[in-house]
Amino acid sequence: MFHFTDSELERRRLDTLALANAHDCDAVLCFGENRSGVAVTYLTEWPVTRSALYALTPTEQHLWVAFHNHVPAASRRARVDSVRDAYGDYLNEVFDVAGSAPRIATLGPIPPAVAARAQQNKSTLVAIDGPHARMRQVKSQEEIEALEMGAEVSDAAALALIEACAPGVSDWQLLAAAKKAYTELDGLDHICYIAVTNMDEPDRDVPSQFPEGRIIGENSMVTFELSASIAPEYPGQILRTVTLAEPPEEVLHLSAVAEQCKAALKAAMRPGVNTQELIALSGMIEQVGLTTNDDLFHGFGMGYLEPIATSSSRIPNHSPDLVLTEGMAIVVQPNVTNAQHSLGVQTGELVVIEQTGARDLHKIPTGLIRAGSPVA
């Protein structure tokens, strides 16, 4: 089981308490539910299951989880003073830890019962999600190492998925091949989105978040977006396109534009560069009458983070004005589609911004991949 060092977790907690203090708060309550709640994981290493509530003060920290049978695993994994059952009058315990502070900082969606108890206690809950997400944009060395491990198991899964691409295979089987590959390497689930379409009669431009029972044919194209991790919430992310036959001109054109744009973005990424400059580079997509149906690039690792940018024609449009900093982890993914959104390619990978530029964390070659051919 992977663990960050004590000093790394202490850094995160002290930075979080300092942020709370800047908002005139002496305690922090973090919430998560249904496998979502990065702040809880960031501060405790517990990947949220059904629900979780974490209380942090300068002198103590405690975690409440549901259901009762999740408490043993959380006790083994979470790095806290105690793990308790979120049952019965547990909110009395929570607010005993938080104390009688008139202002309590919060991270994550606030459960109604907590909001009601805070009102009863005459405590103001102060959301610090925005500044906390900005704090997580720049990664420590330990976080970068965790992302490197995530990229490694993601690559293994991507290679297995590519190898499984053959006529008669379903998207469910592709998912199974990918999952088998990363779980055998101690990898954890994050995402595996897949699309299967006929290149002569395409009907989708981005992968589906769930398998749909699509069957690969002799003239199919498979696109995927895949992330697996070793440390929870520190996955890699790789996006690729696989063809079963010689691709038609439209697929070749979409891929060429996407690869040209991705190469330009990565070549321009370095500390001090404004995201507006990067977005301007993507104008080459619209100049040839194409568009996108996903982000151009986005921050990643312990959350879906800024900078989140789209090409100019993508609706809704995101055009952040932000300067890149050393230590940012960014997925670069200009997934170009036709104007009708009936066909699109996937290309992208996670990079880390270093003094010398963007460093790839993934090893699988970019560009169109032909099923059955060696992936160098």
Image (cartoon, rainbow, N blue to C red):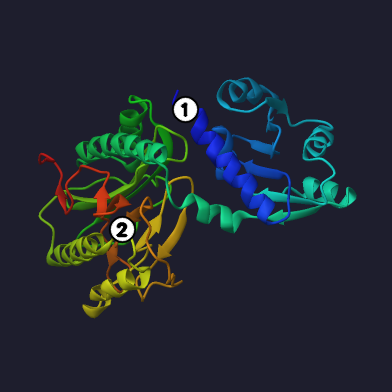
Note whether 82 is above or below 18 in the view shown. Answer: above
Q: Please state which of residues 357 and 156 is positioned toward the viewer in this rendering.
A: 357
Q: Please state which of residues 197 and 257 is positioned toward the viewer in this rendering.
A: 257
Residue 141 rendering spot, x and y as whole percentages: 38, 40
**Residue visible at 63% across and 28% down in the picture:** 80
- Disc 2 vs disc 1: which is toward the camera? 1
Residue 272 rendering spot, x and y as whole percentages: 34, 64
**Residue visible at 21% across and 42% down in the picture:** 363
Given the image, on which type of amino acid does mark 1 rest? His
Marker disc for residue 3: 1
Taking the image as shown, residue 149 lies to the left or right of residue 369, namely right
Note whether 253 is above or below 125 in the view shown. Answer: below
Which quarter of the figure is the N terminus placed in?
top left
* Location of residue 213 by image quarter: top left
**Residue visible at 61% across and 54% down in the picture:** 129
Give the secondary structure at mark 2: loop
Taking the image as shown, residue 141 lies to the left or right of residue 56, namely left
Taking the image as shown, residue 144 lies to the left or right of residue 114, namely left
Marker disc for residue 333: 2
* Location of residue 82 by image quarter: top right
Give the secondary structure at mark 1: loop
